[in-house]
Image: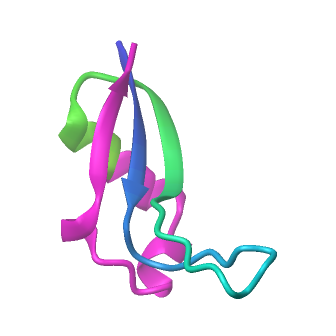
Amino acid sequence: MKSYIIITPEGKTEAPNSLFKVNNMQVLGIIRNVTNENEALKRLLIENDWIIDAQFNVGEFELFEIL
């Protein structure tokens, strides 16, 4: 079975010093014990309905297998 980390460029994080612009990716979740990326994405969305409620664009998500 595989594990994936799912990240997105959407949203923002501010630096403690507000004069600096921070470009980053946000971690939406880590999904374990799945067979592929599609299963990981499906489980992420089922287990975290706030992601859709917050209007994140699933097309922007990046999935990386955790080795």
Q: Quadrant of residue 61?
A: bottom left
Q: Is residue 14 left or right of residue 46?
A: right
| Front-most of residues 4 and 19 | 19
Q: Position of residue 7 (x, y in %)?
A: 41, 53
From what the image shows, is residue 28 above or below residue 43? below
Q: Position of residue 35 (x, y in %)?
A: 25, 22
Q: How many marks?
A: 0
Q: Which residues are magenta?
A: 42-67
From what the image shows, is residue 7 above or below residue 14? above
Q: Quadrant of residue 56?
A: bottom left
Residue drawn at the location 26% of the way across and 39% of the way down: 39
From what the image shows, is residue 64 above or below residue 34? below
The colour scheme used to paint the residues is rainbow
Residue drawn at the location 28% of the way across and 51% of the way down: 62
Q: Is residue 55 left or right of residue 64?
A: right
Q: Is residue 14 left or right of residue 1?
A: right
- Furthest residue in direction right, as rendered: 16
From what the image shows, is residue 11 above or below residue 41? below
Q: Is residue 51 magenta?
A: yes
| Front-most of residues 43 and 19 | 19
Q: Quadrant of residue 45?
A: bottom left
Residue drawn at the location 54% of the way across and 79% of the way down: 12
Classify the position of the C terminus by image quarter. Answer: top left
Q: Is residue 6 left or right of residue 26?
A: left
Q: Is residue 58 magenta?
A: yes
Q: Position of residue 15 (x, y in %)?
A: 71, 74
Classify the position of the N terminus by image quarter. Answer: top left
| Front-most of residues 2 and 60 | 60
